[in-house]
Amino acid sequence: MFSKRHPSGPAMAVLATLALVALSTPAHAADPAEPAAGEISAAYATAACDSRGTTSADSATATWLNGVLSTKMKGHVNAYRISCARMVVEAVRARGLDRRAADIAIATTIVESSIQNVAEEVDHDSLGLFQQRASWGSAGQRLNPTWATNAFLNAMIRKYPNNTWKSAPIGEVCQTVQVSAYPDRYQVEAGDAQKIVDALWSASTHVVALGVNGEIYHTMRRADGSWQSAGNVEGQAGTLPGAVTGVASAVVSGELHVLATANDEIFHVARRVGGSWSAWGRVEGQAGEVGAPTSIAAASIDGELEILAVAGGVLRHTGRNADGSWSGWGNVEGQAGEIGAPVSIGATGVGGTLHVVAAAAGVVRHVTQRADGSWSSWGNVEGQAGEVGNPTSVAVTATGGVLEILASAEGVLRHAGRHTDGSWSSWGNVEGQAGELGTPVSVGAASAGNGVLHVLAVNSAGTPYHATQSPGGSWSGWGNIDRQADYPVTIQKISGS
């Protein structure tokens, strides 16, 4: 999208070194006279995929997917099958591979085992999610989803050198690795495999929090609902000049990008897929000076990072292209109209469109930047969804194309949605659904890609909370993030992605 929004710059390349395994025996040698382990209606002995079992998040994802899948697995996905798919996707991500590798692996498991860790030798001596033969490894190895996935990936990479698996048809790659007697079955499942990966690839929610003394912490809520311990970002990426006053974040192509304001400047850092961090860079050194920023926001559109900043009372916009180059700052209000100095902003991408929400002059407003770089005029959200009082903190994300807006106003956290047809829902009281949390002073929002809305809030006591809204509209209760992530200080601001 930045080829239209922003000028391009020199390309950057990333080299990944992978260990390859030479496998010559087919994964699965089917006998047409025998039932295939991938028969959806057959019942076979299975082994657990995740040793910790299934989770409520697995169940919610399964329910959502059963409504959107269209081929073999439609109506047959359950928490167990999602736990198996989750382990496959996590193995791909752990290697730092493009998500297309996960699409290929999941399409294979749909055909071979109906995404089950089949623990009996139904088809010759084949076992596991991929129905790998005994020549691939021991029974224990083949029934270990992480080991089995990596064995599959090793064979894929060996047979498609120089990343040619990224451009080859999914079904062709599956068949080349598996050497199945039924080569035409894989491509049929490619679309549903991509939907399953969509639901799981970004199912981990990143949370970036700002401590009361200006420290930046990162934690992550995993797909199974567990939390990673909070880590100090500056301890990984280097110390910023002065106390941090604001944070924002967005996930771009699997990498977490964090923005921070310090010393009247904006800084940028990235957490790579493998978990390592880059060093901080000055955004203004790339995009030009904007003055002292008072609020920032970030979004992702088609592999590009979109950055919004309020400086000198004016809302400005820049972008970091996929090749690492930057655009110059643009004056959003010069394109969309003046709204007064925003006190809080949020941004998200929906398709190829950038959506920006701002709390300014006591009103929640909304504007879009189209794929061609042009801007709409500001719209008054409260004119569509109802008045909320004086908003002090806003956040926005998207679930299934629906724009989800959160606003803290008059000591209450509220939620409204803009649907794909342009209509709006009325503001709802989140605390009336999820329980009271005290006066919210900072809010954040994220979508896990499976239709679930994740809501983050910090109350006036400095305690961070998390709640979810399911695709059906029901809410969980608030969970205390600090009890899971163990922040060493109280929190003042929060961002989700």
Image (tube, rainbow, N blue to C red):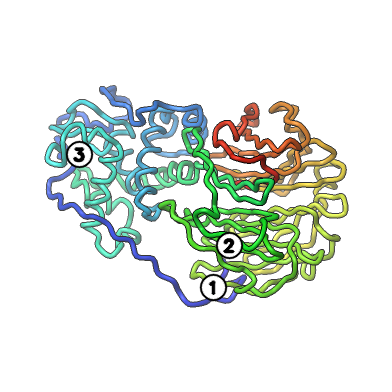
Which mark is first along the chain, 2 or 3? 3
Q: Residues within 10 Å of mark 3 (few under 14, many from 20)?
A: many
Q: CA distance from mark 3 to mark 1?
A: 44 Å
**Residue 363 at x, y = what percent?**
85, 50
Residue 231 appears in view: yes
* Residue under the point 62% across and 65% down: 371
Q: Nearer the viewer, mark 3 or mark 1?
A: 1
In front here: 370 or 226? 226
Which mark is first along the chain, 1 or 2? 2
Left/right of residue 28 with respect to residue 85 in the rendered view: left
Vertical placement of residue 365 versus 90, above or below: below
Left/right of residue 270 with respect to residue 209 in the rendered view: left
Label 2: state its secondary structure: strand
Q: Which amino acid type is shown beneath numbered disc 3?
A: Gln
Which disc, if any, is residue 132? 3
**Residue 65 at x, y = what percent?**
48, 36
Location of residue 88 (image quadrant): top left
In the picture of the structure, the residue carrying the numbered disc 2 is 268
**Residue 406 at x, y = what percent?**
72, 43
